[in-house]
Structure formats: C-alpha cells, structure tokens
Image: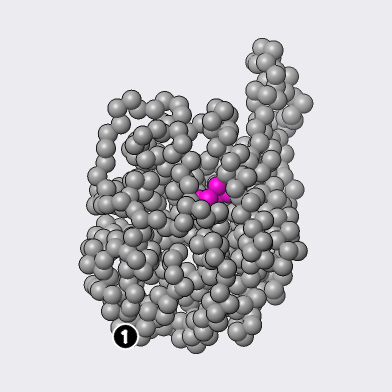
Amino acid sequence: MSETIHSLSEGFTAKTAEDWRPLAEKALRGADFDATLGRTSADGIDRGPAFFERAANAGAVDNRERDLHLPWGMRASIVEATPETANEAALADLMGGVSELELNLDPRGETGLAANDVDALDAALKGVDLSLAPIHLDVILGQGTHAHHLLALYARRRIDGETLEGGLGLNPIGRAARQNVDLDPECFDKAKAHVQLCQAAFPKLKIFRADGALAFEAGATEAQELAIIAASVAAYMRLMGDCGMSADEASQAIEIKLAADTDIHLTIAKLRAARRVFAQIASSFGATATRANIHVVTAGRMLSAKDPWTNLIRNACAGFAAAAGGADSITIRPMTDALGRPGSFARRVARNLHILLAEESHIGKVTDPAAGGYLHEHLTEQLAQKAWTKFQDIERKGGLVAAFGDGSLQAEIAAAREARLKDIADGKDVILGVTKYPDPDPKPVETGGSWGETTSPDSPLAPVFLATAFEGEK
C-alpha cells in the first residue's frame, strides 16, 4: 500500500467569492443577498455566508495532545446545601464517571454548600480521594476564607502538596463586581497570603480564576467576556509577581473560565481566541509557559425553565462546542438549573452527556479540529482582535478594578443584554422551544429544591435567563 499522501484539492481550481456569489444570487431568485444571507455577531463580526480564504494570522492554537481515555476533565458542580447532601452528590458523581469536583460555596447555604469551617468541608468530601479527584472552589458570596479551609483540609489529610491538582478559584475582583460592592483592599492581602502558601507547598494548584463566564451570564458578548478574562489575567499576573512568583509560575497558576452556549461555531472560535489572548498577555510578562488552562461551563443564560427537556439539546450543543474548542475541563449544567437545585436524575443526565461526547462521539480524539476551517479561523482572529481592543480600553482606565469601579463595564454589558433581548423580542434571534416551536404540553422534571438569590437582582452582573421574558407563567 502506498504511503504517499495526496492533496484532495490537487487538480481543482480554487474558487473565489466572485465565482460563488452569482450562483448564490441566482438561487435567491431576486431576494436581497446581504439581507438574506449576511450575518454578524453581537460584536459586529462578519459571519459570512461563506469564506474563501484563510484569515490573517490563522493557524492551529496551542491545544495539548489529549488523553484518549479522559480527553478533558469532567467536572461536576456540587451545589447541595449541607455537607451530608453534598457528600452524597459528590460520591454519586465520581462513581458515575466525573473526574473533578467543584464546590459551589455559599455561607448561607441558599445557592451552594454552607461549609464555613474545615470540619464541614471535610464532611462534604468524606470518602473522596483528594489526591485523585481534583477539587475546585467557586465562591460567589462572602469574602472567602474557604480557600484557607481547603488548604487546611489538605494538611489534615496529609496530602502530598507537590503533586496535588485542583484550584482555589480566587477571583476577588469579579466577586466584588458580581455582589455590586466596592473591592475590599484586604482581599488582595488575603490572596497574597494564599499565593505564598501555594508557592511553597502546593505548586500545581490553580490559585486565581479569570472568570469571563460571570459577565457572559449577565448578558455580555463574546468579545466582552474575553476582554474581562484578559484584564483579570493581567491583574492577577501582577499580583503574583508582587509576591515573588516568576512569570511562568504565575501564568500556570491561573484558570480561565468561559461559558459555552448553543452557538457552536462562535463558541469554538471564542475558546481558540482565548488561548491567543492569554498567550499574548503571558508572554508580555516574560513567560515562556503561555498555554492557557481553560475551564468551560455550559451557559445558564440559554436554559429554559418552562420546558427543561429542551435543555438537553442545548447542553449537548454547548458541550460539543467546548470539547471541539479544546477545553481542558468542562462542567455540563444539569437540565433543571433554570428551575432550582438538581435532583439525582438531572445530575446523572449531565454527567452522562460527558460520556456520550467523549466515548461515543469521540470528540476528544482530534486536537483543534477547527484549524484550517476558514469560518472558525476568521471568527477566531476577529474575536481576538475585538477582545484585545476592549482589553486595552480597560487597561487605559486603570485596569479591571477601575473599569468595574466606575460602572462603565457593567453599562456595556447591560447594553449588550438589552440588545440581545430586543433581537429575541423582534424575532431576529430565536430561542428554539421557547419563541419558536414551543412544546404545547411540556413535561415537568423533579428538582432538588429552589435556589436562593445568588446576587441582588439590582446587581449589574446578576445572571439572567434569556428565555424568562418569553416563557410566561412557569
């Protein structure tokens, strides 16, 4: 058998937009070409209808070669209120196939686990081998002594800190903005103490989280989400540098968090653009380790409360996009997240979607499958450029703290949210199963109880469900 690799395009003349457009116009039978086929993203990026050449600066991004047995970290979010119920959920998820846990912590127990001391955290993780299952924290409310509790738990269980993986999820800037409060300068002092401890004893832990998903859930565009990530990375790189960490150590102590939704192509491009933006910032600090660690969560804002079964399709699309975009770890939300805490069924379906994508669809067997696709490379380049411009605007204002402090960034996100809701109301944007083809008799799904308030409804970064205004009474 010949080992010669033949070019599939050999012998065919390359076609151009000038070749294709007359044929498309003929098929339109007089309909306006741009109005019928032209599309732009919320950031004003041209989406085609078709591209015939590679974008400038296109090419594969720095995605790692994947483990065929575990192509991405399959992370489950634990939101149960008590240590006992949280432990039950954690063990069920681990036995069901997930490989990582994220503890959503709320000192009140209304939207997550009330683990306000090391004993409660220990009880929530009873029977969990912390050396095998990475633990990540997500703290929205409070000023966050939880990272200290987790580190104390590692010490109590005599875990080898040199090999331990996971993350503290520190994001004082984003948390203050989400709570709509001024940033307490002491938060940085506490963060620096954690940096120094991790540097000495837990070198593989992710210390900070550059969280763009919190803005996306409030209605931000893709470029706004990426710009907030870029500004977060810059702020936390500076802070860790002040603590004596090298640029390489600092760059690898940050986890990026992005949201994935049903716009598969734009989500893939967003992840690829995030790697380019992160590499640019890390290298500007002098780092040679410029590969971003990206965690992706399926977006909450896309979910329906009236017909949660349709969320299975939304989550599958978003999970596919996250995997194809090269996410290092993925959280797939339970289908009932728009209604309340998940029950055992919703949790099982969420983790089974991981298995479906990885073991039946084999998405993780290809590294950067979008490389070479003119659409994805064009979107990647344009998103990276748009995000970089917004990032520069934030830096000119004095950085992310200043941009959130004067309210300008929240105002931009609010404007993007209102524009999206108007497009839905006008029919320019469609929510399948809600504004188009709704199920006239949706079937209920059991939940594990209702949510409390994660943030004040008056907060400019309060999360939204885009479908809520169009679903009527639930």
- Residue drawn where x is 61% and y is 66% of the image: 232
- Residue drawn where x is 69% and y is 73% of the image: 285
119 relative position to 46: left or right = left
In the displayed structure, 83 sits above or below 407; it is: below
The chosen color scheme is one colour
Instruction: Name the residue carrying label 1.
Output: 156
Residue 264 seen in render: yes
Image location of residue 431, percent across then percent down: 47, 33
360 relative position to 258: left or right = left
Quadrant where the C terminus sits is top left
The question of residue 217 being in magenta is answered with yes
Q: In which image quadrant can residue 174 be found?
A: bottom right
Q: In which image quadrant can residue 249 be found?
A: bottom right
The question of residue 87 being in magenta is answered with no
Question: 149 and 268: which one is in front?
Answer: 149
- Residue drawn where x is 66% and y is 12% of the image: 29
Identity of the residue furthest to the front in this view: 458
User: Which residues are drawn in magenta?
Assistant: 216-222
Image location of residue 446, percent across then percent down: 24, 44
- Residue drawn where x is 73% and y is 32% of the image: 14
Element under label 1?
Answer: helix
Image location of residue 231, percent across then percent down: 65, 64
Question: 296 and 433: which one is in front?
Answer: 433
Q: What type is the residue that disc 1 sits on?
A: Arg
